[in-house]
Amino acid sequence: MLRRWCVVLAMAGLTIGTALTAGSASAAEHAGSYIPGGPVHLVSTNAAHTRGLSFEAQSTNWSGYAGTTGKYTSVSASWTQPAGTCSRGSQYAAFWVGLDGYSSTTVEQTGSEVDCVGRTAQYYAWYEMYPGPSENYSNTVKAGDHFAATVTYISGEKFSLYIDDSTEGWSHTTTASLGQTPSLSSAEVIVEAPCCTNSGGILPLTDFGTMSFTGSTANGSAIGSAGGLTEIVMVDNAGRDKDSISALSGGESFSATWLRSN
């Protein structure tokens, strides 16, 4: 899936076009600052028999929950956009719902993001039909905004991607074609450290404090009842957790708490 930034280009973006300031970041301001990303980068996967889980996985770029052993045609969740704590350097954190990407090479997703350029936090919303590029929405996004999002498979290669920022009073329903036959092999609700740097590494994770997903569903039912329910924990190269993921509450709600950037 995912949003993939190049640190050098992101920093260079400060001198191209309109200066980036705290608050919303428009598609024009981010033009040229993306490089392709991809699906989950798994470190390990183990069978699990607790808390309704089928598997527990470690990843260098995703954390959250996914259904991974069925055919999935819809996924949805709600969340409040967390504030980024920015001190120095560049960090990135995306919050999204999507289909595919766990055991396939495509991802169909939509969500929000908070990125740091030095001490400046940038907020925006986007969708992506990977391996196609990310597409930013130009609408205002601020910390504290309430989001709801749904990705739905229509037919053939087409998907509907819906995202609503009820705080700012805007929403989008985007119909997009993947350009190839989708796998429909997973449904996920995810916090992501986007990929990649010029050398292919995962980008530093923005300090987002604690955020929560609610109403997480797959195929119209609680994601906790999805086939092959998998808890994904994000780790660094030393195997240390980069954030902590709570157990599912009511099969639909969980929180993520930032621990470290790298």
Image: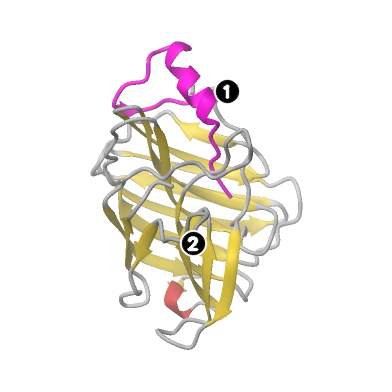
Q: Is 253 left or right of 75, judged from the image as shown? A: left
* Mark closer to the chain start, 1 or 2: 1
Q: Is 247 left or right of 64, judged from the image as shown? A: left
Which residue is rendered at x = 45% and y = 57% of the image?
190
Mark number, residue 239: 2
In the image, 28 versus 121, the foreground residue is: 121
* Picture coordinates of residue 186, whole percent (x, y): 59, 66
Does residue 225 sit above or below 160 in this rendering? below
Mark 2: amino acid: Gly
Q: Is 182 left or right of 86, judged from the image as shown? A: right
Mark number, residue 203: none
Give, as a single range, the part of the protein colored magenta. Answer: 1-27
Residue 10: within the magenta?
Answer: yes
State the count of labels.
2
Judge depth for marks 1 and 2 and give the one in front: 2
Q: Which residue is mark 1?
A: 32
* Picture coordinates of residue 35, whole percent (x, y): 61, 33
In the image, 233 versus 89, the foreground residue is: 89
> Residue 222, can we see it?
no
| Residue 133 picture quarter | top right
Which residue is rendered at x = 40% and y = 84% of the image?
51
Mark 1: amino acid: Gly
| Residue 90 picture quarter | top left
**SS label for mark 2:** loop
* Picture coordinates of residue 209, whole percent (x, y): 26, 50
Determine crowd level at label 2: few under 14, some 14-19, many 20+ residues with C-alpha closer than 10 A. few
Determine crowd level at label 1: few under 14, some 14-19, many 20+ residues with C-alpha closer than 10 A. some
| Residue 142 picture quarter | top left
> Residue 7, can we see it?
yes
In the image, 237 versus 140, the foreground residue is: 237
Which residue is rendered at x = 61% and y = 43% of the image?
37
* Picture coordinates of residue 152, whole percent (x, y): 55, 57
